């Protein structure tokens, strides 16, 4: 049965190639792990010398331009972080606030949460799109983070999986 022998030979050949591909992938992963370790060591060396430069203990003209570039990048990062903080502060001032009325407040007790109008500060029932006092648009507050029932980690609203343990949210 030469046909079956030939078919068996093809199957063995495919199996050998698959085995070779798996072994090659494992070896490439090992090479990448070694390269990542080298990169981590290089980063630590760079951080060591940059810290010495910051302390005034290193004056090497060969890397002075690189140190200046790092300083400029750090300045840009600090300015950008300050801008983010400014935007978040302004957004917090303008965003409608959600409040739960206390018994002494004059709001009806049927609705547990209220949206405070950013224009006139009137309390409006949750789900209202326009202020009942001034007609300003009321945007629903952004959904808050939730917590994973498996690991207890904070999970951003809308996430399908927990970043800490991989728990799937339905």
Image (cartoon, rainbow, N blue to C red):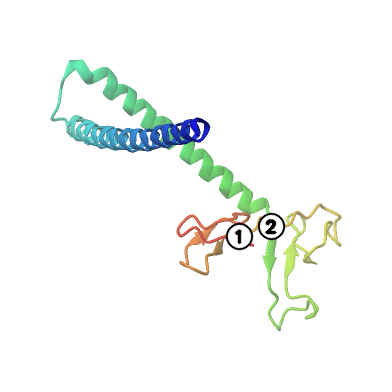
x, y (%) of residue 79?
45, 35
- Which residue is drawn at the image coordinates 47% and 40% (left, top)? 81
Residue denoted by label 2: 141
Decide: few, some or many residues near mark 1? Use Cα within 10 Å; few <14, some 14-19, many ≥20: few
- Please, which residue is most extreme toward the top here? 62
Q: Secondary structure at mark 1?
A: loop
Residue that extends furthest to the bottom in the rendered view of this protein: 103
Which residue ends up furthest to the left in the rendered image? 57
Q: Closer to the camera, 43 or 170?
A: 170
Residue positioned 73% across, 57% down in the render: 140
Task: Tell whether label 2 touches label 1 (CB within 8 Å).
Answer: yes
Q: Tell me the quarter of the picture where residue 46 sits.
A: top left
Q: Which residue is mark 1?
A: 144
> Dot 2 surroundings within 10 Å: few (below 14), some, or many (20 or more)?
few
In the displayed structure image, the side of residue 165 where residue 46 appears, left or right: left
Q: Residue at x 38, y 37 (%)?
A: 19
Tell me, for residue 25, which label it has, or none.
none
At a point 41% along the width and 32% down the height, the residue shown is 17
Which residue is at the front of the view, 79 or 36?
A: 36
Camera-side residue: 9 or 145? 9
- Looking at the rendered image, the quarter that the C terminus falls into is bottom right
- Left or right side of 126 for 94: left
Circle 2: element type? loop
Q: Quadrant of residue 65?
A: top left
Residue 60 position within the rendered picture, expressed as x and y whole percent measured from the top left: 16, 20
Residue 155 at x, y = what percent? Answer: 53, 58
Q: Is residue 93 above or below residue 66?
A: below
Inter-mark Cα distance, 1 to 2 = 9 Å
């Amino acid at each position: 049965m030469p046909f079956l022998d030939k078919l068996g030979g093809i199957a063995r050949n495919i199996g050998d190639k698959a085995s070779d591909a798996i072994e090659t992938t494992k070896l490439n992963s090992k090479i990448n792990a070694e390269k990542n370790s080298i990169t981590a060591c290089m980063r630590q060396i760079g951080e060591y010398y940059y810290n010495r430069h910051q302390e005034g203990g290193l004056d090497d003209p060969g890397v002075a331009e690189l140190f200046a570039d790092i300083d400029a990048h750090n300045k840009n990062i600090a300015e950008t972080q300050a801008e983010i903080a400014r935007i978040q502060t302004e957004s917090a001032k303008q965003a409608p606030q959600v409040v739960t009325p206390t018994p002494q407040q004059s709001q009806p007790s049927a609705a547990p949460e209220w949206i405070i109008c950013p224009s006139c500060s009137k309390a409006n029932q949750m789900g209202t799109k326009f202020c009942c006092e001034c007609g300003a648009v009321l945007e629903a507050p952004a959904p808050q983070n939730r917590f994973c029932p498996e690991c207890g980690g904070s999970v951003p609203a809308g996430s399908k999986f927990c970043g800490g343990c991989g728990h799937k949210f339905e």
